[in-house]
Image (cartoon, rainbow, N blue to C red):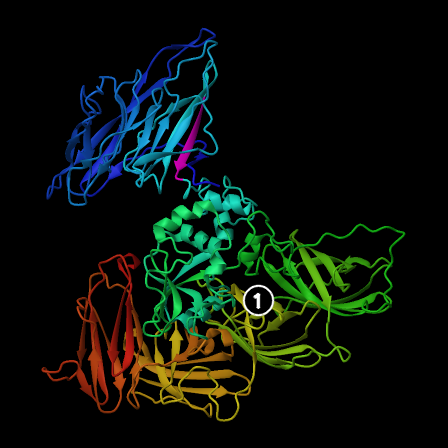
Amino acid sequence: MSNAGMISYLPNRTSVVGYVSNNRLIAYSPQTTTAAVRAADGTITTPEIINPPVIRDIRRSNSVNTLTNASELTDTSNRSITLYNGDINVTKQGNTVILPSNQLISADAVFVRNPVDASLLLKPDPTGSDVFWVRTNVGTNSLQPTLYQPFALRGTSLALPLFVSNAESVIWNNGLAPVGPLGVINPASISHLTWSGAQNAAVVRTLTPPIEGRFIVNTPQVGVDPKEEGWIIHSLDKINARSVLMRSYRLSNGSFVDRDLDGMPDFIEMGLGSDPSSPDSDDDDLSDGDELAPYYVIDGQFTWQEAVADATARGGRVAVFRNRDEYLAAVFRFRNQLVGNLWLGASDITTESSWLWLNGTALNRTQWLLAGVPSWSAFYNEIGGQAIPWSPGMPNNMNNADALVLRTDMLFEDRPVLERRGYLIEYPRTNPSNRDSDGDGMSDGDELANGTNPMVGNPFAGVPTPPVYSPSGPFVNFAASGVAGNYEGLVFDPEQGHTHRQTISLSNRGSFSSAVTGLVAGIRGTFRGAMNPVGYYLGPVPGTLGGMISMELWLVQDGATGQWMIRGRAETNTGVTLGIELRRTKHNSANRYPLPGRLTMFMPMTDQENPGPKGDAVAVGSINSSGVVALSMYHPDNGRSSFSGPILHGDLVALRSLSSTRSAPSVVLGPLNMNDPTADRHFGGSLRYYSPEFVPGSQFQEGFSQIRTVSGARYVAPPRGVLALRGFRTSQFNSQFNLEGGDFGGLSSIGTWSVSNSIVIPPSPAQRATATFAAATGLLTYRYTGTDTDRGLVNAPASGFAVHQQLASVGRGSAVVRGYYTSAFSNGGLSVTPNDGTIPDMTVLSPVKQKLFNGAGATQTYTIDVRTQGAWQVVVPAGLNWATVAVVGADAATPLVGNGNGTVTITVGANETTAQRVLRINIAGVTHTLTQDYRSNN
């Protein structure tokens, strides 16, 4: 569609708009009176009549704190119009508009003006003159505007001015049109005009859809930016002798209008089939903007590879724009909002100048020229008009810049992969016109809330409806191939998610035995039954199944695959109906699993704010030729569990693994998808991690229920003499062991991970750490003991587990090692990252990261222990004025130089800003990072 002006109907909305700065306030003072009104039936009423508001200009001069209520702004005079230019300093009278000499201004002149840019839309004589558009050039340092020559809008003798700015204006075309001979008043006609600088002329844009109503009420608005905020127009229609219908409309430029305020411009919604007048077209509890542009900013300090791993852990990926419309969706979502550059999911790491997105597609001109929507051309003029929005001169590969960055102006730039910044994450894109995009019985909103992928059908979700059976059949031949056998699956609660694992052994006569296990050890039981000839069963269940009282089951054959499955429903004593789906095992001696081998997987939370254990649950294990998955699982609440179960048809595993640790009887329950490869994993899934309340001896006595995504990979043990960590240097001190969050968050150790896959971490006076890596399985075990008086830690121990994942997509320099740590009173994440700094032999820094809360006006001092050999120095950023760095015992002439083991102190003042601040200093070749919160956290 064309780049036209658009309007959106805003029911029951009134508008009170003013201009405000540190020195000026423009406000409206409504005047209310009463009047006797005689209705058509002869009755007399005295309704309130709200007259046009009086505009008050309240301001103060420089260095004066007292506000002065000035007189009312005078809008007209006999021969001229006085303009006002408001800025942050003081309000002064601007220039006078001088119209052509042959055009007189009557005392009844009608006009609107914009006090922000001083523009004017004037009808000098309401009896017949055209409307004049007077634009201005308001200098940034000038209090008075420069006026351009007034521009006559020809053919507007019956028009009335409504809204104006230097860029756009609105007129009521037939505002002065006479009433027809039969008393008919035509509907109001509105024109939206935009200024075309190249032709020095106004361009009329058609409004879509047209405004309803015959009379227009011009609501005064001061200080609006029409391009971003739009105008409000009210129309009135007389319904009967005593009633008037008022409609309110918001008008915006066609390139940017979003009439339903769902974060997605109307022209994109129209092109993609969603409803531009409804923020949630398919009623799935997700806005159309969230479905079409599921992009979100992740703040933090990540290298590009760390961002890739972190996004995977959150259940998404670093944003990929497969084509221009996806890019534009992100532009409209974030334009004028980004405060810093962000990583995107593209790089030329593999082959220089060959840019690839994480999904393997190329970033090239052909890809971005696939579609030609005319509305895009106006937008691209603003950002440079390039097919791919590279910033000028980019990409330039400066300093080996191999990763893509989205700048605050929404242009692309290439930057080195080891730089640190936040990133743009992308979650699965869903269909805004279909509340259940994958057709699995769960709405897209419910799937995201439960941590499942709304674009991949979850076979173990939803509550199925039983079929209608006939006494005459069809009947099930239980002895036929593929009917009898072992079935496994999950039970689903529409309010909680997965709650049970169920197995059924079905005989060739229709009888069966079933076992059900739940979220805690006490929820378990078995029962027997038999299906009738049509493959249906209904009967009671044991009272130990967590509130279940009855179950109905039925056999059904999948029309696409021909595979048999058991579906069902369970009724509970709370009135909630549970859904059941069980599938047959896929592999056996006659159908071997083709790729047996080792596995590793880590399981991060989808909601980082969820209470309960932090860090990633991890597992190591294998798949054998019979398709049985065996896992040893390590829980971040300090529990351990194991699991063994078959791959089912659909390449699914119904996993339930209950911790055997009494102090932490947590359970992991949910589906694994063993055929869900992406650029960042070989298999995936979504698991529920649960612990009941009031567990004695547990850190988490109030219990928890978390959704964790699965990032799983095949694991091949490294050959002898080969470093397991792809991309790590093979020199000394090549690895950094990081504790994240909790009491130990920010504490790190530098170690040497050798090609024999042994790990040596030199001790320091403040900390001791050991790490062992089982190269055969991919499991890392870590133990730490440290003293940090600022944290209240004195010889405090912590331990943890992590797994190594071998993923080719993450590129050089980024082996993925993730897991968790636990201590007596805290837990958090554990990771191993490459140490790329230049570090002297035997150098250990503790801590390498420090986070301070704002000290409510007080200074804070902490120490850094340095263990090294020979001379070393501290390098501080130039211009540092909010922290003081000192080497204890250093000479006055060289205050930032040390020799051998030593101590560095950092003193920090209160952060009086409204933003977090970060300090990075280099100590003996190692980077120490300080992060200080801001005052709103106090």
Q: Residue at x 51, y 83 (%)?
A: 779
Q: Residue at x 59, y 54 (%)?
A: 495
**Residue 878 seen anywhere in this rendered image of the structure:** yes
Which amino acid does the dot numbered 1 rest on? Leu
Residue 106 sits above or below residue 271 on the image: above
Q: Residue at x 50, y 48 (%)?
A: 288
Locate residue 740, reporting x and y percent.
39, 73
Locate residue 184, reporting x and y percent.
47, 14
Residue 252 sits inside the magenta stretch? yes
264, 280: nearer the viewer: 264
662, 416: nearer the viewer: 416
In the rendered image, the residue lying farthest to the front is: 199
- Tag 1: Cα neighbours inside 10 Å, few (<14), some, or many (≥20)? many
Bounds of the magenta segment: 245-253
In the rendered image, the residue lying farthest to the top is: 42
Q: Which residue is mark 1?
A: 687
Q: Can you tell which quarter of the image residue 137 is in?
A: top left
Q: Main secondary structure of the magenta part?
A: strand
Q: Can you tell which quarter of the image residue 520 is in?
A: bottom right
Rendered-image quadrant of the C terminus: bottom left
What SS does tag 1 mark? strand
Residue 725 sits above or below residue 809 on the image: below
Locate residue 190, reporting x and y percent.
40, 28
Q: Can you tell which quarter of the image residue 45 is in?
A: top left
Q: Is residue 799 left or right of residue 845?
A: right
Locate residue 258, reporting x and y percent.
44, 42
Residue 60 sits above or below residue 344 on the image: above
Residue 596 sits inside the magenta stretch? no
476, 536: nearer the viewer: 476
